[in-house]
Amino acid sequence: METRSIPDEQWIEHFDRFSRDHVGCPVTIEVLDETAGPQRIAIELPLEGISFDTKGTRPASIEISVGDRPDRHVSHIIDMPLHIRQVVEGNGDIDVQIEPADGPVTLVHVRVPVQ
């Protein structure tokens, strides 16, 4: 298991490819709030995609969309991301940690089907 930081100049390209490669994979989104503790806001919902709203040369927010029906859809936005780290686990699952300038860290766990 290796943790790798994604350089900010590669974020848009990385997650465009990531979204295409993992669309439909089950995703769990967890917000690590220092006061309230870990909060799961989506559990095992299919990935629709990860996109960016850009301001100038730097992504200003990241939107993670999961779900396959209106009653099972979550859109989670992280404002002003500073650091993005990714870990590929031994079984192929992927964990993405998004650290914003202010606020809680978001963890995105993507379960990759066995091929």
Image (tube, grey):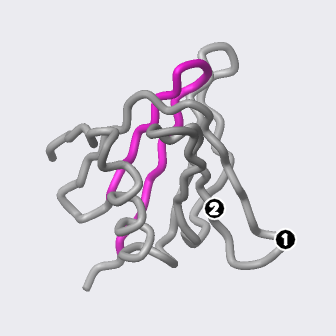
In the picture provided, is 115 more to the left or to the right than 82? left
Position above or below: 115 against 106: below
Q: Where is residue 104 in the image (x, y as percent from the top left)?
A: 58, 25
Q: Residue at x 43, y 28 (%)?
A: 82
The extreme front residue here reads 56
**Closer to the camera in the image, 38 or 66:** 66
Disc 2 target residue: 65
Query: Which stretch is magenta?
Result: 94-112
45 on left or right of 24: right
Which residue is found at the position 15% from the left and 47% from the top? Answer: 1
**Mark 1, residues whose alpha carbon is within 10 Å: few (<14), some, or many (≥20)?**
few
Q: Is residue 39 left or right of residue 109?
A: right
Q: What element carries label 1?
A: loop
Answer whether residue 28 is magenta in the image: no
Where residue 72 sits: x, y (%)?
77, 69
Specify the quadrant of the image occupied by residue 75. bottom right
Instruction: Return the residue at label 1.
Output: 71
Regarding mark 2 in the picture, which secondary structure is present there? strand
- Front residue of this view, candidates 11 and 78: 11
Q: In which quarter of the image is residue 69?
A: bottom right
Q: Which amino acid does label 2 sit on?
A: Ser
Residue at far top of view: 35
Of all residues, the one furthest to the right in this rendering is 71
Q: Which amino acid does label 1 sit on?
A: Asp
User: N-terminal of the two: label 2 or label 1?
Assistant: 2
Residue 27 horizontal/vertical position (percent) = 52, 61
**Residue at x 41% of width, y 76% of height:** 20
Around disc 2, counting alpha carbons within 10 Å, would you say few (fewer than 14), some (14 to 19), or many (20 or more)? many
Rendering quarter of residue 37 = top right
Main SS type for the magenta part?
strand
Label 2 – label 1 distance at C-alpha: 13 Å
